[in-house]
Image: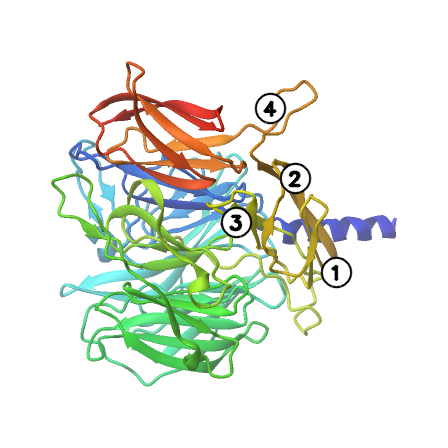
Amino acid sequence: MLKIKAIIVLMLHYCCISAQQEDNVWLFGTNSVNLSNYKGYAFGNSIMDFSNGEPRIYYDSLMTLDFVGTNASICNGRGKLIMYTNGMQVHNGSHQVIKGADTIAYGSFWELFNVKDYPKTGLNWLVGFNIVQGSIVLPWPGEDDAYAVFYHLGRIEFENSFFDSLMHTKILIDSNYQNSKILFKDSTIMTGKFIPGMIQACRHGNGRDWWLVNRSIDREFIYLYLFDPSGIHFHKEIRINVPVEDKGPDKLGQLYFSPDGSKMGLAESILWPFDSIYIELYEFDRIKGDLYPIMKESIKNNRVRGTLAFSPSSQYMYISNHFELFQYDVTAQDVKSTRQKTGEYDGYVFKYNEFDVGTSTTLGCMALGPDGRIYIVPESSNRFLHTIEQPDEEGLAAGLVQRKHMIPTSNHGAVPNFPHYRLGPVDGSIADTLGINNNAVARFRYESDTTDFRQVKFTDISYYRPETWHWDFGDGNTYEGKKPGTHQYESNGSYKVCLTVSNENGSHTSCKYIHLGVTSTNSNGDESNPVIVQTYPNPVQDAMVVTIHDYLPENANIKIYDITGREVLTQKVYFGWNHLNVAGLPPGVYLFRVTDTAREIGGGKFVKN
């Protein structure tokens, strides 16, 4: 009996630590209500879902909460959306206001973003706070289905905004959202004078609890709090700078812990008198909850917010001043000396229609995705997301791709604020007392070369401290190591690719079928894994996105036909995301077919406005 109990406990621990998909759903969108039927402007909200590895992007008509800065959400461990907030309200995964959470952080600052009697609806429109990292949602340690929302309380005085309290709300979410409720709301954790935003968290060294952090308005102190089953407690203040009085606008920036929890970095604008982005990097002890300075640096900021992200392996830190992207190797002896430019804004201006003056698509706020890419959100209103494709590679090999994704609706600088959930305990440390182990989990992604579809690049995105990697490419070839790079297949076919990762706690294997120019069939000869072709938006104004997932085409094309059946446009398309310019087509209804070497793999219709 004792042996059976031990096995059950081990299985529960493995399940809990391996199903970390709390950041699988990302939300975007600025205007959930169409005020003027503005031509070319897609009102509403969009979802980016990483549940199947590669993100699926789609419009969601049920969402009514908008984001212009503050953007925090959480899924359960299996990736189902549980709740989200823009700093003013909290909605559940069914896009309904949670009872009692129709207002959080209420005060004069809240009313500033409450547009009363909004046209067309006659209701109040909660725009959302314009504060990046203005809130974060964490699972309540030791309690199933309980969550905490952390945020600042803002007030307006003499046309200036002040943030004097760090607060939290505890919410209980049931599986079908019907009995979700507020357990307490707007409970004050600490009073002081805080920088708006820069609320982040890191997993404690015991693998269960959390460290929460925020920053004083004068940059002198970092405040650390311990979040454990008994609640949130002030831990310590750490003096890191002499006070700096900034007579410019509110300090704007981002703060993140590295995915392995060993570093904390921040980048913020100090507009006056320095007109710079100020960068700080610290060693973080997630057992004791302490910070030790590594580097301080400043770069020209062009009077915009400082932004920051770490690579999946925690080796590199990326900093943007919106026009240039810099990389630092934070494992080096002299971190500052490793700075190199890995990309710069190409000057593209987005226009909703021919009458729009346009908005820039600069390199704004950043966030590390579950797929191992870093996503960059332009500061101004538009529909694009940039990516850093291989952030664990040095220099230009990191691969900045501008405007890789076009989302169906408008977004205005808002990037989701998540901690790094896939971080376990510090094994063997004094904090490792809960019986939780780092059971390595294998995950990977792949993409084909556009010049040779049989050249497939594999990227490891495994977590929970793997020590060894074994790749089986399904064609008789194998590779040992974390970075297999590009593998050359000799012929078309379906290949079962498996990655096995291991550490002292055991091994885990993940397999995917790679379909090169063919689709899999079952015993009846029917397609058992049909090609997924997705197009959006619909209706379309000037640009349409065509995505192909789970299939690597040999020579695919999309052909567009008018209502009479006449072919009006054709373009070659590849695995992943493809942008199609349809600006030259007259308004009307169109049909499309996607073929690969004369075989149809997708089709449908769309409306051109």
Most foreground residue, 442 or 513: 513
How crowded pointer 3 is (Cα within 10 Å; few <14, some 14-19, many 20+) is rated as: many
Residue at mark 1: 505
Residue 459 in the image, given as x and y percentages of width and height: 56, 54
Mark 1 and mark 4 lie on one chain; the one further toward the N terminus is 1
Residue 76 in the image, given as x and y percentages of width and height: 54, 45
How crowded pointer 2 is (Cα within 10 Å; few <14, some 14-19, many 20+) is rated as: some
Residue appearing at x 52%, y 34% in the figure = 176
Residue 80 in the image, given as x and y percentages of width and height: 52, 40
Inspect the image, locate mark 4, and give the three-letter code of the amino acid beneath it. Glu
Circles 4 and 3, Cβ within 8 Å, touching? The answer is no
Give me the C-alpha separation between circle 4 and circle 3: 32 Å
Give me the C-alpha separation between circle 1 and circle 4: 39 Å
Residue at mark 4: 527
Name the front one of labels 1 and 3.
1
SS at badge 1: loop
Mark linked to residue 494: none
Total marks shown come to 4
Circles 2 and 1, Cβ within 8 Å, touching? The answer is no
Give me the C-alpha separation between circle 2 and circle 3: 30 Å
Most foreground residue, 516 or 266: 516
